[in-house]
Image: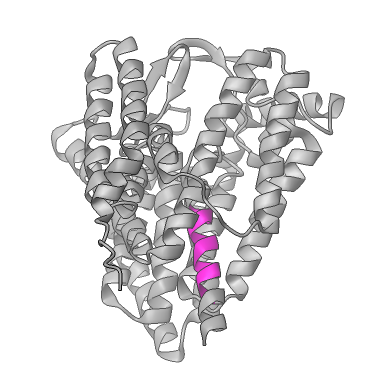
């Protein structure tokens, strides 16, 4: 009988992945040094070090934890060679060389999202007004898309990833609430975005936390709130309900009206689909308490003025809405000229400018479908919407409670992204990666049973 020495997983990790780790760290370090040692670069460097410690301490869960944290702080970014580099892109650059080749079943969803990537690359090469610019933006988009496969692979083998996703999200919501309290009590501007003043109202302060802007923070917090609420209806755990309440407050303080709409639709559908008779009674009591407490909540000045802006007359005179409608019309005119493959990734920014506080900058389209049509045409848009639809349909039909709950989170994002699109960031792809992993987990368990 031959004695076989047991191999230490930690030593195997160091032996197999030390060189790619050093190469990744070196590349990130050079990029940070190239923009100078300012506060943003120092924070990014500290974040990379913390991510590396988590990666080495517990592979691969520690690496995914670092990615989850990076995904909820996209506002902590750097400008390198004229492009914005965000923490999630740095995290993916470090993890991908370490994780190696992922051997997974190649589903229809994978083919569709790969087709969407191909449409971005082809349109950028053939039709973009500035090929190098669009190709670079397409590559940055691909980095965010890789988080879909990374999380899907690790979450399929480690259920703790789902709990980490919820904990990190609740933590981000709590930080957003703390930013608002600091602003309200001490006048701090950390984590605050100001909505411009209009004829009907003064300047409003909304919470953005560590995100790019308040609308995106609100859509993320609303998405998390709906996931936690759907999980509570299925498992009746009070900690899930408390997390839902915290995320809902963060959504309200963001003043993101599209996120409010998405959250309301998702919570209503979740209650109709999953609530038991007892839970419906509790939901009714909760709704009555909200109505009773609404005057107290309306004492928050910014929330009161934002709700007042939802009046039909105020909406029709909202300069932000008129501004978006004007540029959406310009984008539709461009789409009619080249409908099938579009003009390349982020091409509208190259073709139209608008005046901002920082001077003239490239314009953007807030509606997700119009933006994707402009970038990749009908072909890329069908690929993307097909991916979203098939992934959510399979998750909804599965027996896994997390997969069903994530469907409601995706619904909030898809509604909010019709007003402020954020599919160019990593969070939506990470959520769909978790959804796919949860769906596959249910299939594997049914096969075993």
Residue in the foreground of this view, choosing between 209 and 4: 4
Residue 130, above or below 407: above
Residue 192, above or below 272: above
Q: Quadrant of residue 269?
A: bottom right
> In what quadrant of the picture does the N terminus appear?
bottom left
Which residue lies at the image location 63% right of the left edge and 14% below the top edge? Answer: 132
Residue in the foreground of this view, choosing between 231 and 317: 231
Is residue 318 left or right of 17 when viewed as pictured?
Answer: right
Which residue lies at the image location 72% right of the left edge and 13% below the top edge? Answer: 129
Colour setting: one colour
The magenta segment is 431-442
Which residue lies at the image location 43% right of the left edge and 12% below the top edge? Answer: 358
- Tell me residue 252's x, y (percent): 37, 51
Residue in the foreground of this view, choosing between 42 and 262: 42
Question: Quick one: which residue is furthest to the front in this view?
Answer: 1
Is residue 151 left or right of 114 when viewed as pictured?
Answer: left
Q: Quadrant of residue 411?
A: bottom right
For the image shown, how many numbered marks are present on the structure?
0
Residue 407 seen in the figure: yes
Residue 172 seen in the figure: no
Residue 443, above or below 438: below
Residue in the foreground of this view, choosing between 81 and 99: 99
Question: Quick one: which residue is furthest to the bottom in this view?
Answer: 277
Which residue lies at the image location 70% right of the left edge and 23% below the top edge? Answer: 124
Q: Which secondary structure is most common in the magenta stretch?
A: helix
- Tell me residue 194's x, y (percent): 36, 30
Q: Quadrant of residue 215?
A: top left
Residue 12, above or below 138: below
- Tell me residue 347's x, y (percent): 67, 22
């Amino acid at each position: 009988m031959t004695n076989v020495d047991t191999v230490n997983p930690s030593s195997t990790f160091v032996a197999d992945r030390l060189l790619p780790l050093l190469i990744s760290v070196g590349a990130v370090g050079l990029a940070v040094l190239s923009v100078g040692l300012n506060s943003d670069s120092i924070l990014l460097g500290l974040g990379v070090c913390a991510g590396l410690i988590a990666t080495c301490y517990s592979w691969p869960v520690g690496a995914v934890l670092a990615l989850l944290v990076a995904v909820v702080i996209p506002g902590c970014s750097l400008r390198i060679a004229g492009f914005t580099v965000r923490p999630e892109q740095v995290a993916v650059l470090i993890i991908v060389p370490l994780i190696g080749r992922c051997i997974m079943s190649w589903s229809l969803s994978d083919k569709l999202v790969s087709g969407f990537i191909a449409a971005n690359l082809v349109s950028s090469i053939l039709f973009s007004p500035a090929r190098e610019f669009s190709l670079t933006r397409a590559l940055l988009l691909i980095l965010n898309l890789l988080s879909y496969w990374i999380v899907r692979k690790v979450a399929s083998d480690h259920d703790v990833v789902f709990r980490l996703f919820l904990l990190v999200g609740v933590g981000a919501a709590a930080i957003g609430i703390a930013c608002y309290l600091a602003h309200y009590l001490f006048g701090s501007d950390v984590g605050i975005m100001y909505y411009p003043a209009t004829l009907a109202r003064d300047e409003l302060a909304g919470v953005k936390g560590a995100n790019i802007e308040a609308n995106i923070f609100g859509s993320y917090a609303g998405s998390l709130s709906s996931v936690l609420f759907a999980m509570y209806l299925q498992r009746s755990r009070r900690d899930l309900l408390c997390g839902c309440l915290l995320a809902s407050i963060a959504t309200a303080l963001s003043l993101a009206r599209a996120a409010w709409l998405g959250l309301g639709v998702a919570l209503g559908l979740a209650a109709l689909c999953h609530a038991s008779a007892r839970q419906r009674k509790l939901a009714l009591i909760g709704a009555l308490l909200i109505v009773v407490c609404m005057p107290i909540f309306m004492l928050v000045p910014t929330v009161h003025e934002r709700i007042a802006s939802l009046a039909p007359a105020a909406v029709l005179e909202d300069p932000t809405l008129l501004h978006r409608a004007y540029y959406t019309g310009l984008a539709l005119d461009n789409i009619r000229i080249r409908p099938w493959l579009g003009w390349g990734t982020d091409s509208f920014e190259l073709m139209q400018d608008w005046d901002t506080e920082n001077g003239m900058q490239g314009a953007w389209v807030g509606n997700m479908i119009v933006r994707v049509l402009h970038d990749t045409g009908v072909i890329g848009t069908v690929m993307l919407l097909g991916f979203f639809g098939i992934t959510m349909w399979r998750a909804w039909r599965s027996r896994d409670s997390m997969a069903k709950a994530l469907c409601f989170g995706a619904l909030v994002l898809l509604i909010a992204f019709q007003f402020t699109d954020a599919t160019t960031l990593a969070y939506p792809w990470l959520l769909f990666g978790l959804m796919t992993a949860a769906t596959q987990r249910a299939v594997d368990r049914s096969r075993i049973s």
